[in-house]
Amino acid sequence: MQYWKFAIGILWCLLFFSCKEDYVYQQERVLVVEGWIDSGDYPIVMVTTSASFSNEEQKIESLDEYLLKWAKVTISNGEEEVVLTGKIDTCYTPPYIFTTGKMKGESGKKYRLTVSYKDFYAEAETTIPHSVPLDSFTVSRVEKDSLYQLKAHFKDEKSDKNFYKFFVKVKGEDDCMRPSFWGTINDEVLGEQAEAVVYQPLRMFYGDYSPFYHHDDIVAVKFVQMGEEAYQFWKAFDELQSFSGVLFFPVTKSLPSNIKGGIGYWFGYGAETYYLNLDSISI
């Protein structure tokens, strides 16, 4: 998801902080874990420590000292346990992840994650829900503009309480899937025949942001069902994205975490991925 370009302002907002004058203080480093496992895919975990910020200039390269390349990361599905291997992956920032080709996510199974490094130790559990397929996509022109809005259509199972999330990758713009802007959904707001707008991701260090697409964009859309802990995290993340740059809505709270012994998240997703050429979708 290539968070650290955004994580300089977002991921490390997981810190439990207080503000005084122009500084952000933290008493000690905390283990930060960011991990997920999709149904039908291999896990990805990133391990760092939290950082204290001030109004003094910090170079992005200096963040490497918070990256824990030698951590021991394991996952267990109740039947077997696998130690994940660390490797460079330039899709992410920082470009280092832990993963394995020995265990794929399966819907309905529970996965326990443990992370240890020197005096740090953290653990978390997650269950992968079943995936929900999308029925179709529609594209419509944004009024008085040459941009286009993308909508996804699907059937929501009203017998259950469900939570959904969109991730998006636009060819030529993204190396990895990024969270769709305001792409977190509680099915309480949906009808049985549901539709949802799939907005572009909010990217850091880019020019003017538009949530809409160009007619010739090639887009990958990952649609996931997730548990309530993941919903609460991504809902807070959406709010943080929206309000962190607004003067009258200062961000003063940390993101939710399901990591015991650290902060961050470990989530299971029932995932379906679609590859779209917007030119080929009827308007």
Image (cartoon, rainbow, N blue to C red):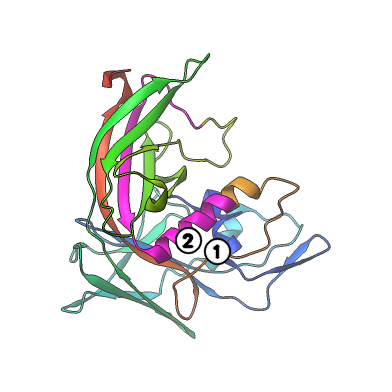
Residue 14 visible somewhere in the drawing = yes
Report x, y in % for residue 234.
47, 56
Q: What x and y, as percent, mark residue 117?
A: 44, 80
Residue at which label 2 appears: 233
Residue at x-position 62% and y-position 67%? 51
Provide the secondary structure element on which disc 2 rests: helix
Instruction: Please report contact status of discs 2 and 1: CB closer than 8 Å, yes or no.
Output: yes
Q: Position of residue 169 (x, y in %)?
A: 37, 38
Q: Amino acid at mark 2?
A: Phe
* CA distance for labels 2 and 1: 6 Å
Q: Quadrant of residue 270?
A: bottom left
Region in magenta: 211-239
> Where 131 sits versus 177, above or below?
below
Q: Furthest residue to the left?
A: 79
Is residue 213 covered in magenta? yes
First along the sequence among labels 2 and 1 = 2
* Residue type at numbered disc 1: Leu
Q: Secondary structure at mark 1?
A: loop
Please identify the residue farthest to the right as the structure is shown: 21
Horizontal relation, residue 212 to residue 73: left or right: right
Please give left or right for residue 247 compared with residue 138 in the image. right
Residue that appears at 35% across and 24% down: 139
Q: Is residue 31 magenta?
A: no
Residue located beneath label 1 in the image: 255
Q: Is residue 55 left or right of residue 62?
A: right
Which of the pair 92/104 is nearer the observer? 104
